[in-house]
Amino acid sequence: MSLPTRVGLAALLEDAENAERQLLDAPLVEQPSTARPDFAALLAQMTFDTAQPIEHPVPRVPVAGLLPITGAAFTPPTAQAAIEAAPAAGPPPLPLQSPGDLVLCIGLRADAEMLARDWAETTGAELIRCAPRGSAAADAVPDGAVLSDRRDAAAARARGVERGAACIAVLGLTALGAEVDAAGADGRDRQLGVAAGILPDQLWLVVDVGRKPEDTAAWVAACRDALDVHGVVAIGGEETSTPHSVAALGLPVLWAHNSNTRKDSLS
């Protein structure tokens, strides 16, 4: 092992001794002391970096003295209560009667027809029925003089100009009451669709004040949803002790005289 240059196992042992000597001769790394100020700062920084956010519990409301929540069902307001909240309407307009004017009267069954006939006899206006084409109401008119669309309305206006009088159209709603079945609602929607399509110059709702307010409110609301209504013509005031309840509809009211006189329907 006294060779000038060691080889093999001797060389490996010499390298290991040199590496160990270098480790022993290296300066020691100074360890932080718990008594030094920088150790306290280091500990505070580590605490801030690793700390988790504290979740504060939501304070509970004390239940003592609180009323229990009951399961009572909600009862919607009636139609009468809804219309009673409507603001008071102003004075009614005058019924149109100039040549070529198209006035539409809508009511339940024959109510509108009865009133329109009185108006037509007084002013000389033409009386014509408004109904969907092909419906039972349209087929009931022998000569086929029915308003079913805008072209029919234009022809009626032209006849009014030639005669020097207005034209009064009549639409009798077949579906009435606060609740109607699907077929009745569909038929009423068709009737109101035709009424909107003829574009009348003035539209009156003929209301029998002797009927139930809830039923009246239902069909009047359906008309107002689809059409621009100018006012209400009240009939039947002689047959009830509360005729002025019609004012709760929130529309201008025009009172008809001798409204209890029943006349024949259109023929």
Image (spheres, grey):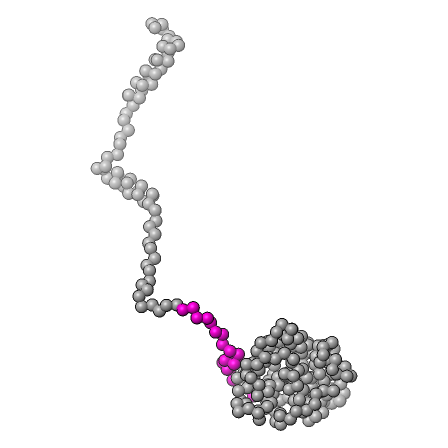
Kindly tell me whether residue 159 is visible in this rendering.
yes
Q: Position of residue 215 (x, y in %)?
A: 57, 81
Q: Position of residue 127 (x, y in %)?
A: 71, 87
Magenta stretch holds residue 99? no
Q: Is residue 86 left or right of residue 205?
A: left
Q: Please tell me which residue is depicted at 59% across the width and 87% down the height of the picture.
A: 208
In the image, 124 versus 138, the foreground residue is: 138
Magenta stretch holds residue 79? yes
- When the figure is inspected, residue 243 is found, relative to residue 55, above or below; the finding is below
Quadrant of the image containing the C terminus? bottom right
Q: Give the extent of the magenta segment.
A: 70-93
Q: Position of residue 34 (x, y in %)?
A: 23, 37
In the image, 113 versus 215, the foreground residue is: 215
Q: Main secondary structure of the magenta part?
A: loop
Kindly tell me whether residue 193 is visible in this rendering.
no
Q: Please tell me which residue is depicted at 36% across the width and 5% down the height of the picture.
A: 3
Q: Position of residue 179 (x, y in %)?
A: 58, 76
Q: Quadrant of residue 230?
A: bottom right
